[in-house]
Image (cartoon, rainbow, N blue to C red):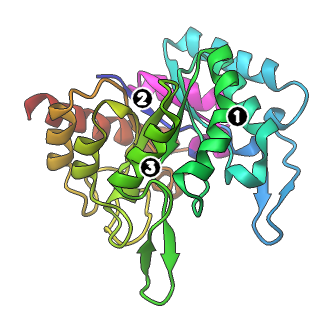
């Protein structure tokens, strides 16, 4: 199986081009194109703020094309991307731009968050508006399981796609092969919102075509390296084997790399790649 990881956490230190180069050297087959700087939200005002990043400007396509060239030269491919979020706040134009940039970089799936507090039918309006662009560029859209936070109970609570039932409803109400599921394993394991990753994997079945893999204490959204906290990856591996999962193993352990800096981040990348290969082995041997 091919292994991949997001590039945002490393690009903050060394830039996207160097991040891709080092990920290839660390043993990754693919990279997940993080596009958060395309449209950055000021959470205090819930409005867009300028980042000065190339993805935000007129030369966004040129930037995405350059990243593909760097990746091609390093023998690594873009398997998927992550559009900026929250989707309602960043706006349709940026979501369409994210789909376009995914195609330019060579990716096949663009993860676009549903609105946390909207129903499957309400979120379908957004996805149906984006589908013509997805088909034009040959890029599937993946919706993702989300979570809210209950301050009274001090734990996560229901949000769009958080349960297997609601996740399937989001996919099935649109009923188009260009809308698929990206299961965030950490979100699925948070007590109070998710159904548990193994159960959700089995319920999603063929709808599941992308993953966000990381570890947590089953309470908070820690985004740590797999096998470091409390998620049972043995059961996840069995479930992925059962449904004959055909996608890549894509890590989203971005907070793990916060402990590293530009001088030693390659060491963190190598450890991430090792954790992904460990999960691959578990799937094969399940």
The residue segment tinted magenta is 10-34
Mark 3: few/some/many CA within 10 Å (<14, 14-19, 20+):
many
16 vs 208, nearest the viewer:
208
Depicted 71 relative to depicted 33: above or below: above
Q: CA distance from mark 1 to mark 3?
A: 31 Å
Q: Is residue 16 magenta?
A: yes
Which residue: 52% across, 25% down? 178
Whether pointer 1 and pointer 3 mark residues with C-beta atoms closer than 8 Å, the reply is: no
User: Which residue is the site of mark 1?
Assistant: 129
Q: Nearer the viewer, mark 2 or mark 3?
A: 3
**Viewer can see residue 83:** no
Q: Quadrant of residue 192?
A: bottom left
User: Which residue is the site of mark 3?
Assistant: 253
Mark 1: few/some/many CA within 10 Å (<14, 14-19, 20+):
few
User: Which residue is the site of mark 2?
Assistant: 26
Residue 242: x %, y % from top left? 15, 33
């Amino acid at each position: 199986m091919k292994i991949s990881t997001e590039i945002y956490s490393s690009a903050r230190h060394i830039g996207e081009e160097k991040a891709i180069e080092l990920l290839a050297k660390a043993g990754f087959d693919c990279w997940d194109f993080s596009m958060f700087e395309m449209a950055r939200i000021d959470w205090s005002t819930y409005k867009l703020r300028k980042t000065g990043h190339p993805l935000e400007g007129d030369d966004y396509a040129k930037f995405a094309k350059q990243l593909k060239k760097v990746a091609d030269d390093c023998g690594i491919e873009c398997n998927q991307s992550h559009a900026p979020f929250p989707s309602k706040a960043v706006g349709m134009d940026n979501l369409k731009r994210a789909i376009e940039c995914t195609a330019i970089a060579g990716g096949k799936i663009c993860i676009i968050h549903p609105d946390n507090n909207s129903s499957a039918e309400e979120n379908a309006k957004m996805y149906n508006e984006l589908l013509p662009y997805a088909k034009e560029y040959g890029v599937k859209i993946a919706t993702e399981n989300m979570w809210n936070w209950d301050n009274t109970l001090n734990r996560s609570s229901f949000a769009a796609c958080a349960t297997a039932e609601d996740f399937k409803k989001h996919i099935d109400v649109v009923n188009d092969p260009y809308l698929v599921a990206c299961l965030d394993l950490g979100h699925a394991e948070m007590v109070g919102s998710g159904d548990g990753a193994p159960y959700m994997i089995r319920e999603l079945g063929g709808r599941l075509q992308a993953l966000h893999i990381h570890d947590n204490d089953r309470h908070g959204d820690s985004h740590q390296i797999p096998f470091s906290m409390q998620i049972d990856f043995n059961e996840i591996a069995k479930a992925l084997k059962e449904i004959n999962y055909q996608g890549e193993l894509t890590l989203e352990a971005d907070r793990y790399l916060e402990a590293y800096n530009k001088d030693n981040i390659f060491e963190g990348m190598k450890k991430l790649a090792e954790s992904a290969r460990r999960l691959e082995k578990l799937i094969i041997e399940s």
